[in-house]
Image: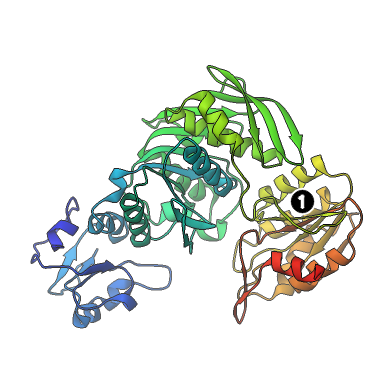
Amino acid sequence: MKLSEILCGINVKNEYKDKEVKNVTDDSRRVEEGYLFVCIKGASFDGHNVAKQMLEKGAVAVVCERDLGLDGQILVESTREVYSPICANYFQNPANSLKLIGLTGTNGKTTTTFIIKQILENLGKKVGLIGTVQNMVGDEIYPAHYTTPDPYELQSLFRKMVDAGCEYCVMEVSSQALAQGRVAGIHFALAAFTNLTQDHLDYHKTWENYFAAKRMLFENCDIALTNIDDKNGLRIVEGLPCKVKTYSVDNNNSDFTARNVCFASDGVKYELVSDKIGRVQCPIPGRFSVYNSLCAVSAAISLGFGFEDALRAIAKCSGVKGRIEVVPTDTDYTVIIDYAHSPDGLENIISSLREISKGRVVTLFGCGGDRDKTKRPLMGAIAAKLSDFCIVTSDNPRSENPSEIIKDILEGMKDTKTPYKVIENRKEAIIWALENAKENDIILLAGKGHETYQILNDGTIHFDEREVVAQFFE
């Protein structure tokens, strides 16, 4: 592909020689003869510092945002902002052939994207998915390294979807991805907002930065679907030119409202009130499943699918790995795995389990290392307040000392009357929980969810909680 084709639509500040380009990258380790290298300044590495070496390595040109005095430099205003459209051009703009549905918010993105995918597939559409658990092109699964991939991988996935005949793509859009321009230049048919609570402040530093990053998604969509039960639901779409649709459980003035909600161990049921009234049955238990399913079915209807068709389609949906996932045990108690790793997420899952529990709710949890430390005592306080018994353990400690993370969690539990036990090793903690389970208990393993690994100070190890439970019963 010609360099001029890859730079089509991009404001280049200088003259350049048009050459054949073999590939594009912002990773200096991947550069080979014939590559176009985009210099991006990150938190710990600035691509501009190795631009000269990349040309010596065989790069046809380097895209930079400051004059490096190099033959072969291409000057732009912001390399981070142009990298996404450069990748899109390289893959021949596949997103233009897809109807994109983007979801953002603190909690609920993963489950809701899976439900939307299943609804659309039940309505006869071929659908791609991009998210935390996995990426999918129809039924084909690709590993997910980030909630929202970097621009090159993202455009590559779009290309695979188009080539496979997908008409829709449902994707989680993280705040980091929005702030880093990973979806710059991408237009969404519908963008949906789930909720906003404390998370990722280690990256964004302030609440307003976090909010502003989330809001960016709605600046480039045709329809914004927002949860107005959340205090930020209307604010996040305020003043934007897109068409706004609202959903709610508490507010009768919303476009889509859930009424007469019924909870059961096998799912939730409620009346969906819009310009019509119908009964929604979603086979995923928990109070927040009302919001997730309501968002999903509202998205389908907002995109033009029939009201009754959407309701029939959601009734055929199944659960999501690592989200209120019941682990087979054949015992008189229940083991549930859930990804809840934020204060709000933990509160939601424990509260939902309380509504269906006939015995104790025992919560096993930890907090991730090298992440927002302020949420640790909050999560400790929430777990202690809502659970009958807590087991405090490790999550992904990363470079931090696990015992120091646990100390932070226990700060929020120091005034509690709820009994708890500290077992730093997560496998040992799970085994202890199973050995001491009582009839009708719900044992909640919170924080890891779909993950099949644990990140320790000395590296990443294989760790699948399902396997730990299965091995215990063997």
Locate residue 96: give its quadrant. Answer: top left
Numbered disc total: 1
Mark yes or no: residue 61 visible: yes
* Percent x, y of residue 176: 46, 56
Which residue is at 23% across, 66% downward? 64
Residue nearer the viewer, 242 or 240: 242
Residue nearer the viewer, 274 or 216: 274
Disc 1 marks a residue whose amino acid type is: Ile
Crowd rating for badge 1 (residues with CA inside 10 Å; few <14, some 14–19, many 20+): some
- Horizontal side of 113 relative to 138 (left or right) equals right
- State the quadrant of the N terminus: bottom left
Looking at the image, what colour scheme do you see? rainbow
Does residue 223 sit above or below 351 in this rendering?
Answer: above
Q: Secondary structure at mark 1?
A: helix
- Horizontal side of 193 relative to 128 (left or right) equals right
- State the quadrant of the C terminus: bottom right
- Horizontal side of 416 relative to 251 (left or right) equals right
* Percent x, y of residue 214: 47, 46
Mark yes or no: residue 233 visible: no
Which residue is at 67% across, 59% downward? 447
Does residue 120 sit above or below 374 in this rendering?
Answer: above
* Residue that badge 1 annotates: 382
* Percent x, y of residue 60: 16, 73
Locate residue 108: give its quadrant. Answer: top right
* Percent x, y of residue 117: 49, 43
Which residue is at 75% across, 43% downward? 352
Does residue 171 sit above or below 467 in this rendering?
Answer: above
